Image (cartoon, helix red, strand yellow):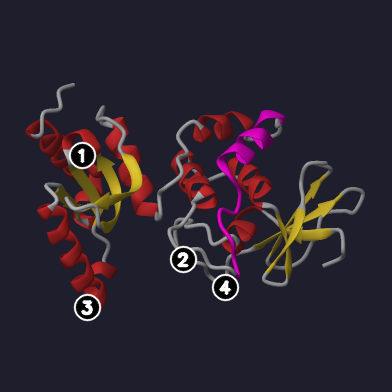
Amino acid sequence: MSDRQFFSHTTAARMWLAPLAGYFSALEPLHVMSRSPERAARGRGIVGHETNDPHLIVVDRFGFPVADPASTWLQLAATPGVSLDELIIVADHLVLVPEYVNPADPRPFVTLDELRMRMAGYSGRGARRAREALEHVRVGSESRRETQLRLAIVRAGLPEPELNQVIYSKTGERIGRADKVYRRYKLIVEYDGQQHRTDSVQYDRDMTRTEEFIRADWFPLKIRKEEMRNGAAEATRRVERALRERGWTP
């Protein structure tokens, strides 16, 4: 690539570790963007793009030139086949402030306010979808499934939970963070990923944490992969039942 070319679109999203649908394949084309007046890149396995966007910043990522996170997200909004939910999932990932930060790869990659400011002056392709998606972006979802579950809960007409909140014992000791929290109803909702069962150390840690939640008078509700099928109908049914049992009324 020349010094006026860089990775963009889904290729850039992969480099920002975005949880896109499907696994990366060596057969997946590389998206390469060129700054005008340089022409779009051509070649086998390459999808070329051109831009004159003055707000786009090229940054170094793993030693490669890549579109900045906000610009990458806007490019996804203009990409055929990328759904509204996919945009929300990727944005949740980009704005995440994890509990433990890797000094070698600081987070968030972009703040929610920065994403909003970038969006404010954007009128290119995909602008309408990006604005719609941005309304549903939240700081706190740590995985693709967590975002999907949150969206399903809200779309089912249930109250929106707080995300990744710290829970304390009755004596004020820190128990840990919980995926989704309804403080008023002392309800915790968490997606039980496969790694929680296959990793024995993680499993034991989760069991201990769950017991401590219960001792602190919280009710931890675990959502399994199978319950996320059919639009997470079973998952939202269980969340609604748990909320109603704890006093919630529509």
Nearer the camera: disc 3 or disc 4: 3
Earlier-in-chain disc, 2 versus 3: 2
Q: Residues within 10 Å of mark 3 (few under 14, many from 20)?
A: few
- Residue bearing mark 1: 236
Q: Give the residue at x 57% y 35%.
A: 130
- Residue bearing mark 2: 23
Earlier-in-chain disc, 1 versus 2: 2
Task: Tell me the amino acid under the disc marked 4.
Answer: Ala
Q: Position of residue 174 (x, y in %)?
A: 28, 57
Q: Residues within 10 Å of mark 4 (few under 14, many from 20)?
A: few
Residue at mark 1 to residue at mark 3: CA–CA distance: 28 Å
Residue at mark 2 to residue at mark 3: CA–CA distance: 25 Å
Rendered image quadrant of residue 244: top left
Residue at mark 4 to residue at mark 1: CA–CA distance: 37 Å
Does 210 sit left or right of 110 as displayed? left
Task: Tell me the amino acid under the disc marked 1.
Answer: Thr
Earlier-in-chain disc, 3 versus 4: 4
- Residue bearing mark 3: 200
Task: Decide which of 206, 81 is in the foreground and name it.
Answer: 206
Task: Tell me the amino acid under the disc marked 3.
Answer: Ser
Q: Secondary structure at mark 3?
A: helix
- Quadrant for the N terminus in the image: bottom right
Q: Is residue 69 magenta?
A: no
Q: Which residues are magenta?
A: 104-121
**In the displayed image of the protein, which residue is found farthest to the top?**
250
Mark number for residue 20? none
